[in-house]
Image: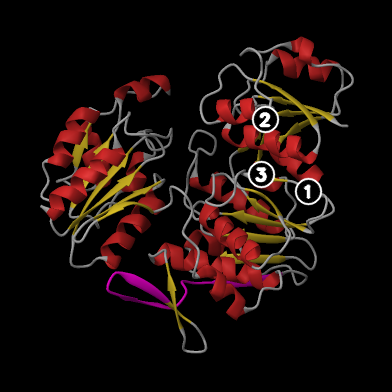
């Protein structure tokens, strides 16, 4: 039985990897200096929760078959130092996923936006048709108990290809290490300013990914994205390049229908131009994996959407409340426009929490200019303490207004005041969109949604 130790086992993807390896039959141990829910409960249920939080070099011995280090660990981590001293096999998360899938067909979904949704769509279609597959995805998906699955039997693995760094000691983007056979670039919009200080450096990472497409490989890309066009140029005669656009559709009574080549209409549960592009990307991948068009549509009609991606919280007769993981400018624009187009007769109140390093960085903020023009009422929230924690300079609400190029933008730095403002809105024939990668500092979104729908009904 292989023994594997995970440094920073409490991370979102790392604890899922620990559970997947345990399920595969490996003897798994791990350490972390802080483990939050749901990782704590899930690791405990599998008997993998460390007895104490912290780093313990004595856990590292010569009998370990592999040590996997997560991004949360620091380069001077004492367990990592001990593993290096013993010359053990040390992997980052993407390195290990590649090692475990060397004999499989690897499909890697890259891009600044839409990665999780495209990956979720592909997994849904493959499972709908009973196909065997492994996967690694960056979010918990409906119907899948783990974010990682590694088996000996599956001939293919579907990987969400994050462009962020691989580990504290490996500064290469994760998606460079998977060595894809089929690659997807869903769009390129500058992000992670703390790692990629210029738009050119950021775009270069996708150029490297595109160039890694092997002989007889396939690169699928958004043909309408200007930045993607710069890197997905058909230069290799041995590679198949496939450009895609938004799937043809029609919207009636708040419901979106896909239009097929057979003049059929397929009702779907997701909506918005960005999701129509995600569907086209997933369809091209599934075609490469042998899924016929009619079978794809049969499956996609039952796709509920990826968790935290334009997710319905509550719906009433004249009001709906959605939440979305959106925080980057391109995601913000796409999500807000999707709600306006799906419900053109209703007002839209949209609230964004600035929570990531890039979104709170004064050098990056101008990227948000006119990205929040679609909502009738636009609101931005940020917590000054988060700026301090990320060691960023103070941010004035007026500077945020100016960066978004919207003078009527409402800016809040207190979550209670934000909650009061939202409760004061007239909600009849009005929808609410909440966008964050955080929590609005504990604002009870479920209760807020109940109140919004209730007030609209009253």
Q: Which residue occupies 59% across, 80% down?
A: 294
Does residue 195 appear in the picture of this structure?
yes
In the rendered view, does 228 fall on the left or right side of 2?
A: left
Residue 279 x, y percent position in the rendering: 51, 67
- Mark 3: few/some/many CA within 10 Å (<14, 14-19, 20+): many
Asked whether the residues under the numbered discs 2 and 3 touch, taking CB atoms below 8 Å apart as contact, a structural biologist would say: no
Residue under numbered circle 2: 46
Compared with 429, 75 (above or below) is above
Distance from Cα at disc 1 to Cα at disc 3: 10 Å
Per the image, label 1 sits on a secondary structure element best described as loop
Of marks 2 and 3, the one in the foreground: 2
Whole-angstrom CA distance, mark 2 to mark 3, is: 15 Å
Where 447 falls versus 211 (above or below)?
above
Q: The N terminus is located in which quarter?
A: top right
Q: Which residue lies furthest to the front in this view?
A: 45
Q: In this view, does 409 lie to the left or right of 445?
A: left
Q: Give the range drawn in magenta.
A: 240-257
Residue 413 seen in the current view? no
């Amino acid at each position: 039985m292989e023994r594997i130790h995970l440094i920073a086992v409490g991370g979102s993807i790392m604890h899922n990897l620990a559970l997947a390896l345990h399920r595969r039959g490996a003897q798994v141990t791990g350490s972390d200096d802080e483990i939050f829910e749901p990782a704590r409960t899930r690791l405990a249920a599998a008997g993998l929760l460390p007895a104490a939080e912290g780093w313990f070099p004595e856990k590292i011995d010569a009998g370990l078959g592999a040590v996997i280090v997560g991004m949360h660990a620091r380069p001077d981590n004492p367990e990592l130092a001990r593993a290096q001293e013993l010359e053990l096999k040390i992997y980052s998360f993407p390195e290990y996923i590649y090692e475990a899938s060397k004999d499989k067909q690897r499909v890697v979904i890259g891009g600044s936006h839409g990665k999780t949704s495209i990956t979720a769509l592909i997994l849904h279609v493959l499972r709908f048709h009973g196909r065997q597959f492994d996967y690694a995805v960056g979010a918990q998906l409906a119907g899948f108990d783990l974010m990682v699955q590694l088996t000996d039997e599956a001939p293919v693995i579907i990987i969400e290809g994050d462009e962020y760094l691989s580990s504290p000691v490996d500064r290469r983007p994760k998606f460079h290490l998977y060595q894809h056979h089929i690659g997807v670039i869903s769009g390129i919009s500058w992000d992670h300013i703390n790692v990629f200080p210029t738009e050119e450096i950021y775009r270069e990472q996708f150029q490297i990914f595109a160039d890694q497409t092997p002989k007889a490989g396939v690169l699928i890309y958004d043909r309408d994205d200007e930045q993607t066009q710069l890197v997905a140029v058909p230069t290799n005669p041995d590679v198949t390049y496939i450009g895609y656009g938004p799937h043809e559709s029609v919207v009636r009574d708040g419901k979106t229908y896909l239009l097929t080549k057979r003049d059929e209409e397929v009702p779907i549960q997701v909506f918005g131009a960005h999701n129509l592009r995600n569907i086209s990307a997933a369809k091209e991948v599934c075609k490469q994996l042998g899924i016929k068009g009619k079978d794809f549509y049969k499956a996609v009609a039952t796709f509920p959407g990826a968790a935290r991606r334009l997710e319905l919280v509550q719906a009433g007769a004249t009001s709906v409340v959605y939440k979305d993981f959106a925080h980057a400018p391109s995601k913000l624009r796409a999500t807000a426009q999707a709600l306006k187009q799906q419900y053109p007769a209703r007002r839209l109140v949209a609230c964004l929490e600035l929570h990531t390093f890039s979104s709170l960085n004064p050098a990056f903020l101008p990227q948000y200019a006119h990205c929040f023009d679609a909502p009738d009422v636009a609101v931005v929230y940020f917590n000054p303490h988060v700026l301090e924690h990320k060691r960023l300079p103070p941010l004035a609400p007026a500077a945020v207004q100016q960066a978004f190029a919207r003078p009527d933008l409402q800016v809040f730095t207190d979550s209670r005041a934000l909650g009061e403002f939202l409760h004061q809105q007239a909600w009849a024939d009005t929808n609410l969109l909440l966008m964050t990668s955080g929590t609005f500092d504990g604002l009870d979104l479920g209760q807020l949604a109940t109140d919004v729908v209730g007030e609209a009904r009253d």
